[in-house]
Image (tube, coloured by chain):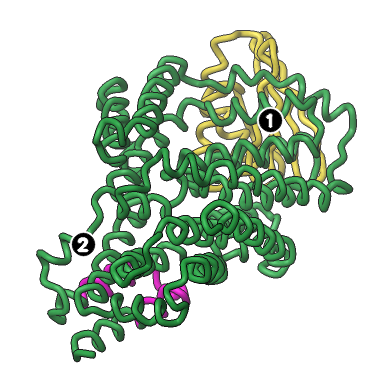
Amino acid sequence: MSTQAIVAIGVFLITYAFIVTEKIHRTIIAMAGGIMMVLLGIVGQETALHHIDFNTLGLLTGMMIIVAITSETGLFKFIAIWAAKKVKGDPLKILLVLGIITALGSAFLDNVTTVLLMVPVTFSITRQLRVNPIPFLITEIIASNIGGTATLIGDPPNIMLGSAVKELTFMAFINNLTAISFFILFVNIAILAFIYRKQLHTSEELKANLLDLDEKEEITDKKLLIKSLFALSFTIIGFFLHQLLHIESATVALAGAFLLLLLTGEKHLDKSFSKVEWTTIFFFIGLFVLVSGLIETGVISLLADYSVHLTGGNVTSTSILILWISAIASAFIDNIPFVATMIPMIKDMGELGVNNLEPLWWSLSLGACLGGNGTLIGASANVIVAGLAAKEGYPISFGKFLFISFPLMILSIVICTIYIYLRYLI
Amino acid sequence: MKLEYVYDKKLLSLKEAANENDIEFSIKLLEPELKNRLQKVREYFDDNDVLTDLLYYIHPQNKYQVIVKKDFYNEFIIQLFRFQLIQAIRWS
């Protein structure tokens, strides 16, 4: 191993350690690590830029702009109240519908954005019914991570996978992950409903109060809503057709975002741009450059070589290993850097003779996305909801969440193991 | 010290009731154009980073239920005054 490779590993491990400890913001650390790779001459600036995946960045930015404008219309509050009324204000059924809405939202929007939209309306509904909001918040966290698994645009690991591997199109994700994700969602929500059933009771008077709400009044700007729904539909149809049209998913998302800005005018420009999570965008940039150091110095190839040696190049054992390692790792560390490291490694495995990479990619996606449900620090959505809940006087402790979520995550991965084995490996 | 307020009964009716850590307001707007002013009060609280300081429920026929955390009671009354939904406030 060359000196440069050893230095690259050192920079990578130190950066990773800082990301895990969360003492300093992950974006600062990832960017510092990426810059160190360039400053130490491990990768040149041009090479580093070449490794930044602008498809991932464009997709995230475009969707964030669309959501920022759409959220101003009151649409999400309307949907939640409408759904709560449809189930006659029954808290147990509201738990189910809010879980499903969160999962559907997360399948098409960023998980953090979805929970940020769902949490306020959850507090609003649970306060109206005078029920404990914690079961609803925990259900939404779990539903959000499962829903995000279902599509190419649902969760950053999937965005990265779709961007890195040409065959993993939007439709490929729909065909391979959507059904299993929603099966896992229904299993998880059914178990959560069973666990919390005794806490979810309210009076008929409070239910009647909820049923009297006028959800249509929550729509604050009907013209903006029509324009937003048009742009959102255009974007989602674009995702379904992007392979057919030979355009990247980022082009679809950015086209949708700027079509919406074209329709709504300048007044939404500054506000929507200010709501783009630039810290997340730069976190990705830092990670891409950081991992490029490992790729360019041959470290990733060595790791792939070692993994293939370990499993004998057997697709079944490699897939199952990737699924479980991704899940356990993602329960404790950020799944984005993990997936950023795993993608080039799996690609190298292909060059080392593993002839069917498809089950490996789906194992990585399912493990990395669903693993986030394992602990309270497993995914950004978990941390955000727990932070909001604590601030509002409803703390969700690490232990309390772990007690519920870790067994559910293990169950989800067991289901995935069976799915991967039956669908791809026999 | 508590805030006392005065409002025009021709424009709206306003009832409040204490409930554990909250104060629940039942508001009925008799003039529909006041809706925008009440919406501005809501937006003021929506813009801060506390989610449950003010919970706002819209019922048919210009009726509103607003649940305000006790810590935000004075701020809510001040915002009602700011957007001219109440006419006067004073410490009692």
> Tag 2: Cα neighbours inside 10 Å, few (<14), some, or many (≥20)?
some
Q: Which residue is depicted at the point 39% across and 20% down?
A: A230
Asked if the magenta segment contains residue A142, the reply would be no
Asked if the magenta segment contains residue A21, the reply would be yes
> Which SS type dominates the magenta stretch?
helix
Where in the figure is residue B26, as x and y percent of width and height?
A: 74, 24
Residues in magenta, as a range: A14-36
> Tag 1: Cα neighbours inside 10 Å, few (<14), some, or many (≥20)?
some
Rendered shade, chain A: green
At mark 2, the secondary structure is helix
Let me know if residue B48 appears in the view: no
Does B25 sit left or right of A269 as displayed?
right
Rendered shade, chain B: yellow
Q: Amino acid at mark 1?
A: Val
Q: Which residue is mark 2?
A: A51
User: How many angstroms separate mark 1 from mark 2 (CA)?
Assistant: 52 Å
Q: Amino acid at mark 2?
A: His
* Quarter of the picture holding the N terminus of chain A: bottom left
Asked if the residues shown at circle 1 and circle 2 are in contact, with their CB atoms under 8 angstroms apart, the answer is: no
Tag 1 and tag 2 share a subunit? no
Q: Which residue is mark 1?
A: B66
The quarter of the picture where residue A205 lies is top right
At mark 1, the secondary structure is strand
Chain of the residue under the numbered disc 1 shown in the image: B
Vertical order, A20 against A170 (above or below): below
Let me know if residue B40 appears in the view: yes
Q: Which residue is depicted at the point 75% across and 33% down?
A: B24
* Quarter of the picture holding the C terminus of chain A: bottom right
